[in-house]
Amino acid sequence: MATLPNPLPRLALDPSGRSLGLRLPPGRLVDATDEGPWHEPLLWHAEKPAAPGTWKALGAPGARVGLLPVLVDLGGPEAGGPRNWGLLPGETSYPGDHDAEDVLAEYWEDWAEEETGGPIEPFGADWPGLAPAPTPTGDPDTRAAQVADSLTDETSEWFKEAHLALVPARRSADIPAAIGWTGPQYHDGDVARPCAVLRSWEDRFGIRVVGLGLDVLVVSVAAPPATVADAESLAAEHFAFCPDLAEGGSGGLREYAKGLVGGHSWAFSWD
């Protein structure tokens, strides 16, 4: 996988990040993988939970030196966060080597052939194609900061204890691949393939990868679909990307699609 120079080793000697132009709170570097220590840190995360405004204060300065922000969940059943997630960077390819539509079509055909009736209506077993790109309606990074702030709330549905992390990655969609995240491993063992889909969503919908848990992914959305028809096409992509959505009380594709119209965050969980 093609990578940029990793600034994180500099934090081992300079934990404050001042040599990188950063002012970091106390934190820790993570190099733990499922196969032992990685040859360099995969990410840095703050020791204290994030608060509203943390993303905006640290995310933009980090991005300027090639460290992209993401919130990681250190609470709940996955207490300990990325150190205990079984990361597999050595088994991850490069997202740019995969075509998003080919990946989604494969996912859809594998899943939809087992489904009948309600869950996938108005579509059938054949892949319906990519949803159209909406007209941009906001700045992706501003929307990401807003969604990130919502995840720091103790009443958040998805996160128990959100901590800001910084990851060396070329673009937000590549963050899961950059750390070898294994959240969707029972759906696809190479997270670079889902990241290819995230790249496509980044281009079409202005998404940013805002949060990662053990098997949870939350993205912000700057340009959500504006019509039900477009939302249904996008819902097909979501159900292919994360088939567990269809089994999680979503009420089928049509019902799920209604919640995508104008929605500025999407969440996925693979059991």
Image (cartoon, rainbow, N blue to C red):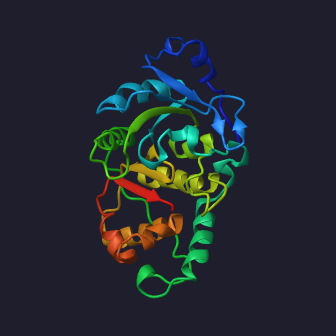
* Of the pair 134 and 248, the residue shown nearer to us: 248
* Of the pair 196 and 166, the residue shown nearer to us: 166
In the rendered image of this protein, does residue 114 appear above or below residue 170? below
Q: Is residue 236 left or right of residue 29?
A: left
In the rendered image of this protein, does residue 43 appear above or below residue 174? above
* Of the pair 192 and 129, the residue shown nearer to us: 192
In the rendered image of this protein, does residue 86 appear above or below residue 51? below
**Who's the residue at 58% across and 83% down the image?**
113
**Who's the residue at 55% across and 42% down the image?**
175
Picture mark count: 0
User: Does residue 83 appear in this view?
Assistant: yes
User: Does residue 171 appear in this view?
Assistant: no
The N terminus lies in quadrant: top right
**Residue 192, x across and y down, in percent:** 63, 51
**Residue 25, x across and y down, in percent:** 42, 20
**Who's the residue at 32% across and 45% down the image?**
138
* Of the pair 86 and 89, the residue shown nearer to us: 86
**Residue 234, x across and y down, in percent:** 43, 66
**Residue 89, x across and y down, in percent:** 68, 43
Q: Is residue 259 left or right of residue 72?
A: left
**Who's the residue at 72% across and 48% down the image?**
91
In the rendered image of this protein, does residue 79 appear above or below residue 47? below
